Image (tube, coloured by chain):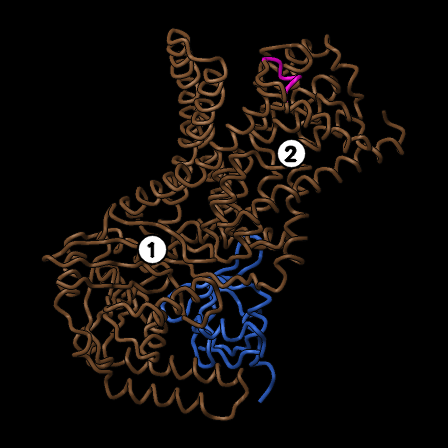
Chain colours: A blue, B brown
Amino acid sequence: MTKVNFMTLSEAKIGSVVRINSIEESVLTPRLMTMGLIPGTRVEVLRSAPLGDPIAIRLRAYNLAIRKDDAARIEVSPVD
Amino acid sequence: MASLSVALTGNPNTGKSTIFNELTGARQKIGNWPGVTVDKKVGIVEYKGRKISVVDLPGTYSINARSQEEQVVSDYLSESKPDIVVNVVDASNMAHNLFLTVQLLEQNIPLIINLNMMDEAERHGVKIDEQALEKAFGMPVTNTIGRSNASVRTLLDVFTNTRMSNYKPSKILQEHIEKIHAIRTSDRTPEKMEEDIITARYDFIDKVMAEAVTINAADKSFVDKLDNYLSDGVSALVIMLAMFYLMFQIAFNWIGQPLADMLGEFFEENVASWATEAMISAGVADWMQSLVSDGIIAGVGAVLSFVPLIFTLFFCLSFLDGTGYMARVAFVMDPIMRRAGLSGKGIMPLIMGFGCGVPAIMGARTLDTHKDRMISILVTPFLTCNAKVPIIALFAVMFFPDNAANIVFAMYFVGLAVAILMAKVLGSTTFKGQESTFLLELPPYRIPDIKTVLLETWEKGKGYLVKAGTIIFAMSVAIWFLSSFNSDGMTDEMNESYLASIGSATSVIFAPQGYDTWEAGAAIVTGVLAKEAVVSTLGILYGADDISTEVDDAEETSATLLATSMGAAFTPLSALAFIVFTQLYSPCVTALGTIKKETHSWKWMAFAFFYTCAVAWIASLLVYQGGKILGFE
């Protein structure tokens, strides 16, 4: 498998739909997971805030704002 | 019949508080959970001869005790053991909401699962089979439409008719609980354990959802379309600035402040003069007259004159919060506020601080974490509120006639810079390690429930009057005493009062700043009562009675005071050092009383007083000594 398929949530294009592969271990992990960000979850990247950060994503039928730093801990792969 | 205790739990933005307000109306008490800055809302309803007490627990996503709110919910449920726990679930956002539901059920807490906002869910193409849901959990399921009183009242029947002991967890729920138990007792690292538990919960939720919920994906929703303008691109920034401007105007220029001025004037012209006349004709002793008109009536007037401001501002804040727009403000402002160690939502109270610190400090309540609330409360007093402007304007015109406007602008900047600096300092010292992350749900836009907005506004105003009002009143009377008495008894001359003695004692510490006159010291002391008092005290002490404290009259006041010995008491440099000090030092008594009310702690109030004075003293010192080194006078 080429590495091309892997990226972080912060790198995903606006408007794209991705699936979470894994979340890097940190003190934040349980909080991210509690909000529904768990491996296998389908996430749509909605927009980034006017100043570039944070980004708005849609998962489990609700919208969530997340900082790019935190999104960078989440590895995702594109969904067609 | 025995009384019944009901607790409402649920995520934020589920309409839980609206349900609570519909159930209990104005018969609710807002207090505080011990030791934390979280509202405790309790209401009593009489229904079919039974007394039902309803507690509105703080909205949380889980009960892991990671925040004060989560701690409160978890402690309350385990210690108070209410007869009925209602889990309010936003029907249009079930997959996420059920996380808390599952976690509560794992703790063996039987629940009534209340699907709220069923109307909205239907519009979003969400169909829920309530019977299937009831079967999946083994718990009773009800539904409501948040703003419909009739639908909420049916809950009362459910409360009185439901025996929670009749419900047992379903088979699949039992299996889930056993699975969680197995994970907990296995030998995994604590991190892995927590992750596996969370994953298991969502697995279970997905199973339940598959059985009871069908979602027909609707086309691009209204929310997304609105968000294209309100939280994306340049339009978001423009709309936000317009919104800030509008709120500021409503509070301080159009409605709030004009009402406050009218109230203040009414008190001064009618109540005070009527009382004075009445007392004179009754032959009341002089000290009593002074106590009543200068102490008590002035104190009550000071408390009351803030009320219109607080009501107006909280109506606006509460309304905006109800629409879901505040979450967008936080979303847009986060990168800027983060640099100051705060999160995006904190911008709203801070902006209000440029008008008046009191509602700004109360507004900190709307912030999400304890750290954000405390930092916001503690840095707000540095901002240039309306009451500080007359001091700056007067000194700017008196000592910098050619650069007055620049000085005023510079002082706004100094206040803001110190606020940001201290936010960073407090964030990395006193409140270090209390993570202020930013994972914010962006709820759908909704029309706010007016009843909830009005109740919240009323509660804020009442809280201010009752809790802060008494402290402010007591301090006002104390300052009256100090300015009207000395060791020989009562005095008409303020410069012979205790206040003057305190002023001259205080002035000693300002020697390194170049304004160690007792007049300046006394003005600083009375300024704690209200910042405008700095100008009027200087006027009285330099023998120019009845000078105006209005900014518009600064030139006239300046000319009057320059003719007195005040002109020689300050050099331009020491005048600058003095205004820097008055910009930054202690919040006024009203703000101090509000800090006490909001933090529930005399300790934090004292801290706010001393640390702002220390910061002001140092800043003023830097200006004066730095200026001298650079060759200014």
Q: Residue B119 or B491: which is nearer the viewer?
A: B491
Above or below, A74 relative to B517: below
User: Could you tell me residue B494's position as x and y percent?
Assistant: 62, 17
Q: Using the image, tell me which numbered label, if any, was put on residue B573.
A: none
Q: Tell which residue pokes out farthest to the front in this image.
A: B488
The residue drawn where x is 51% and y is 35% is B590
The stretch of residues the image draws in magenta is B492-497
Above or below, B587 relative to B194: above
Task: Judge the density around disc 2: few (<14), some (14-19), many (≥20) Cα neighbours within 10 Å.
Answer: some
Residue type (three-letter) at the residue carrying disc 2: Tyr
User: Could you tell me residue B581's position as x and y percent?
Assistant: 70, 33
Secondary element type, mark 2: helix
User: Could you tell me residue B358's position as x and y percent?
Assistant: 50, 37
Left or right: where does residue B622 sit relative to residue B74?
A: right
Above or below, B306 relative to B460: above
The chain identifier of the residue carrying mark 2 reads B
Any magenta on residue B355?
no
Q: Which residue is mark 2?
A: B412
Q: Which residue is mark 1?
A: B222
Left or right: where does residue B393 sit relative to residue B443?
A: right
